[in-house]
Amino acid sequence: MITDHDPQLYFHVRIVMGMILGLSVTRLLGGFAKFVQHPADNEVSLLHLGWAFVVLLNALMFWWWEFRLVAVLHWTFELYLFLLAYCSIFYFMCVLLFPDTVGEYGSYRAYFAAKRRWFFAFFALSQVFDLVDSWAKGPDYIRALGLPYTITTSTSILFSTIAILTGNVRFQAAFLILSLANELGWTVWLLHTVN
């Protein structure tokens, strides 16, 4: 009988998380491929592509760092649901970034502008979930991330809220540049701290 202390539980959870994140990454890669397959059909929007790249990096880093959950000694159904919800947020962002068709919007630029509230709401939610996820990994993990983690994550939540409220493309572009720099910075830093 499997108990909440059984290490096999983590591997079971990891498989389900991998399926959802795999669908997310597949959706993004398929979306990027559309621009190569049919360049005349889809007007390129650097803002849209930039956010898709940020979400791709974010999803890949989330997937990479979830191996630290192997250290969780007591699994609960609530933690399981939380992790599946967190993975699902990535999937929703990916579907919002690359729908089956942009249809009546005519371009990804117009589509992204119309769906920005949804996208940035899910992006903010992903940051909130990241805070909770980091705390679930324990105080040592939080200490290792330090104050920069709390500042950058809180800033992302604040800027996402502003992006929901304003359609200002310059603000969204500045936020994109900061998010990309943040994601690349954490990627370099975290990859050099793997234990």
Image (tube, rainbow, N blue to C red):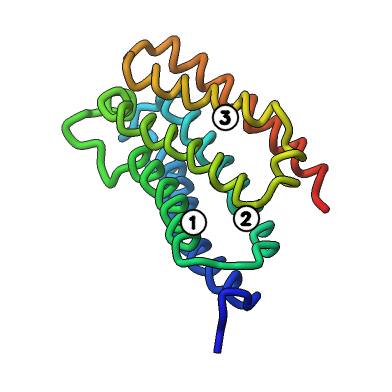
- Give the vertical position of 162 relative to 40 (above or below): above
| Residue type at tag 3 | Thr
Q: Nearer the viewer, residue 67 or 54?
A: 67
Q: Which residue is mark 1?
A: 83
How far is mark 3 from mark 2, CA to CA? 17 Å
Picture residue at 48% right of the left edge, 37% below the top:
128
> Circle 2 — which element?
helix
Q: Kindly state the secondary structure of the residue where label 1 is placed.
A: helix
Tell me if label 1 and label 2 are in contact, CB under 8 Å: yes
In the picture of the structure, the residue carrying the numbered disc 3 is 153
Disc 2 crowd rating (10 Å Cα; few below 14, some 14-19, many 20+) is some
Number of other residues with Cα within 10 Å of mark 3, as a class: few under 14, some 14 to 19, many 20 or more = some
- Quarter of the image with the N terminus is bottom right
The amino acid on which the numbered mark 1 sits, given as a three-letter code, is Leu
Earlier sequence position, callout 1 versus callout 3 = 1
Q: Is residue 135 above or below residue 124?
A: below
- Please tell me whether residue 114 is drawn above or below residue 95 in the rendered image: above
Amino acid type at circle 2 is Glu
Q: CA distance from mark 1 to mark 2?
A: 10 Å
Residue appearing at x 59%, y 48% in the figure: 62
Q: Are marks 3 and 2 in contact (CB under 8 Å)?
A: no
Instruction: In this rendered view, identify the residue nearer to me: 127 or 36.
Output: 127
Residue at label 2? 66
Q: Is residue 195 left or right of residue 54?
A: right
**Mark 1 crowdedness (10 Å alpha carbons): few <14, some 14-19, many ≥20:** some
189 relative position to 168: left or right: right
Which of disc 2 and disc 3 is earlier in sequence? Answer: 2
Tell me the quarter of the picture where residue 187 sits. top right
